[in-house]
Amino acid sequence: MQKIFFYIISFTLLFSIYHPVSAETMLSPSYRIRFGNFNMTSGTKSSTSYSLTDTVGQTAAGLFDSNGYVVKAGFQYIYTLYDFAFAISDLSIDFGTLTPSSFSSGSNTLTVSAPGQGYSVTAFETQRLRSSSGDFVPDTTCNSGTCTDSSAGIWDSTSAYGFGYNMVGHDIPGDFQDASYFRPFPDFSLGDSPAIVMSSSAAGENRSANVTYQVNVEGSQAAGNYTTSIVFIATPVY
Amino acid sequence: MQNISFLTQIFLSILIGIGALSHIVKPTFAQSASLTITPPVTEILLSPNKKLVHSFTVHNQGETLKLSANLHKIMPTDSWGHTMVDPTPLDESSIPLIIGIENADIKLGEPFTVNSGQSQQIVLSITAANVDLPVDTYLGLVFQQFVDNPPDSPQIPGITALILVTLTPDGALPLSLEIADFDLPAVHDSAQILTFTPKIKNASSIMVRPAGVLEVVSPKGKLVHSQELFPHLVLGNSERTLTARAKDSSIPLSWQASKLALGPYKIRLKVMSPGGTKLEEVERVVWILPIRAIIITALLSITILIALIRFRSHKLYY
């Protein structure tokens, strides 16, 4: 009896102290209320002289007409069931201590919900992986030295050094044929144009792609903390 | 003695449990971001010297974030309505608009905090310059995580609302549209769906949302198929792939001929102004043939013929 009581106390203690690990993004709940069709009037109106689509009473979306200006807000001609949304699962990628001629990697997930006609996500790095003393890790050119900001190549040779990324999932560029294909990020400090990393011309909810960041340094790389920022911007189709 | 031992056991188990869990279960807080924006696209037609006020709402579905709002130029990148945001913030002297934030506590480019589950409304005032001719300006209002020292935050998320503005003194807009890439095969199998991917080119610098229709006319002159075009927005000096309007979405333009269709069919594409004036019409002729049926019939005929010949020679032999 005492043993049973002992085990009950131990298990109760275990589950009362345990906290779940919070590494995932909490996305929107399933009961979100949209105001589009709960207002005073909504829908398609027409007469012999005009035809328009509106939602009266909405804060921002709808059709506003006044003397001197016309504003059309939202996805005209399309009734949307969800908002344009963009999520990144983890904002802090830490490669830890790097070992020369050995790959280190980290990953996160980009998720987009795009009503209307689709979306695109662009990416660029603010600078190369750089230390406070000005040393930098070069952007990868992959095994063959030919991959670019817009064209992925196989990068699995530890004698090819640099920093790059791979993408797997929905709406990714076709040159990421599998998990061994990498590209370097466009470098904003060098005037590079952002790269399109996800793109669709159709509406879609919770379209997601996993980004794997990979770095490999040579033995002569100066010691130090190397950092950069990767900027991801989601844009709807007009 | 037994009771003391039991209480000691409980006490020890509590101590051991707390000690072990504090080492084993380390809560990990990987910061994430999840943003929505409303409205995602705004088209504005504005008279010179007029000012309008319009609001945008960013909603934070993830963890509490420090954001900033910036205006950037955008450029169309393909014929599907995708755009590229210029990473450099807008130089306002380069556009015929004066844009400001009406919020008392928020300024463009400066940080504001949006708590988890909360929204922030940004109210923009847009004032048109005095212009004599229509002119377009395409902007993106980018809500981006604000980082004091950029390299300290490896991932910076941003979400864009498109603001597409036409300034016009009198409401009269130049229209210069051309249908392109409407190339069809000379012959098509009636068993296959014929898909069309024409483009509309806007040669003027002013955006337009044209309407239109795709029609298929039989050799007898009867209208056998009609599809309303989706009224896509075509930015100035850009092109857009035309699609058909379905109930609440757009679908590819296509036509499935009837099984008995035969002869030269006229495929007609009409593009009209938003007011209904016909701007452009292109017609192509496609010969619809039951190619699959012909092949099957031919194969069957040959098989039957061979069988008959063999049957005959077999009969003659005996």
Image (cartoon, coloured by chain):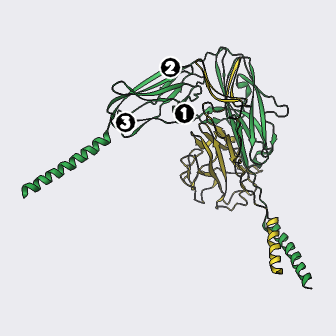
Disc 2 to disc 3, C-alpha distance = 31 Å
Q: Amino acid at mark 2?
A: Leu
Tell me where residue B205 appears, x and y as whole percent.
59, 23
Q: Nearer the viewer, mark 2 or mark 1?
A: 2
Mark identifier at residue B79 = 1
Instruction: Please name the residue that numbered disc 3 is placed on.
Output: B258
Marks 2 & 1 on one chain: yes
Q: Earlier in the sequence, mark 2 or mark 3?
A: 3
**Badge 2 element:** strand
Tell me where residue A209 appears, x and y as whole percent.
62, 50
Residue drawn 9% across the image and 55% down it: B315
Dot 1 crowding, Cα within 10 Å, few <14, some 14–19, many 20+: some
According to the colouring, which chain is yellow? A
Residue drawn 7% across the image and 54% down it: B316
Q: Chain of mark 3?
A: B
Tell me where residue A86 appears, x and y as whole percent.
68, 44
Mark identifier at residue A144 = none
Disc 1 to disc 3, C-alpha distance = 31 Å
Q: Colour of chain B?
A: green
Disc 2 to disc 1, C-alpha distance = 20 Å
Quarter assignment of residue A120: top right
Residue A186 shows up from this direction: no
Tell me where residue A131 appears, x and y as whole percent.
75, 51
Dot 3 crowding, Cα within 10 Å, few <14, some 14–19, many 20+: few
Instruction: Please name the residue that numbered disc 2 is placed on.
Output: B279
